[in-house]
Amino acid sequence: MASEKKEAPELVCAHCGTSSELTPILKYVHQGEEKNVCVHCLPMLIHG
C-alpha cells in the first residue's frame, strides 16, 4: 500500500508575507476575519 501525501494549500503570513514552505503558519480569527500568522510574527501579535 503506497501512502499518498496530501498537498496542503500554501499559506502566507498576513504580517511579513512568508510562506508555509519556509516556516509554520497558524490560522486565527480576529473581528470575524480569518487570518494567518507565522511563528516568527506570533509574539508581535500577542504582545502588540
Image (tube, helix red, strand yellow):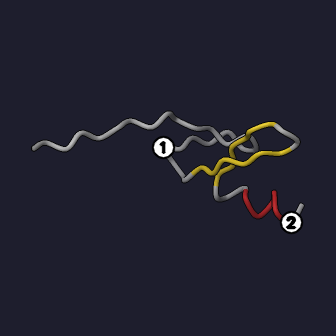
Q: Which residue is mark 2?
A: 47
Q: Position of residue 44 (x, y in %)?
A: 81, 60
Relative to 6, 47 lies left or right = right
Sequence-wise, the earlier of marks 1 and 2 is 1
Residue sitting at x 62%, y 38%: 12
Relative to 37, 33 lies left or right = right
Residue farthest left in this picture: 1
Residue sitting at x 9%, y 44%: 1
Neighbor class of circle 2 (other Cα within 10 Å; few <14, some 14-19, many 20+) is: few
Q: Position of residue 7 (x, y in %)?
A: 38, 35
- Could you say which disc has been placed on residue 10 in the image? none
33 up-or-down from 22: above or below: above
Q: Position of residue 38 (x, y in %)?
A: 65, 52
Residue sitting at x 49%, y 33%: 9
Q: Quadrant of residue 41?
A: bottom right
* Residue type indicated by callout 2: His
Is label 2 in a helix, a strand or a loop? helix
Residue sitting at x 81%, y 57%: 45
Is label 1 in a helix, a strand or a loop? loop
- Residue nearest the observer in this picture, 3 or 12: 3
Q: Which residue is mark 1?
A: 21
Q: Quadrant of residue 42?
A: bottom right
Quarter holding the C terminus is bottom right
6 up-or-down from 38: above or below: above
**1 and 2 marks in contact (CB < 8 Å):** no
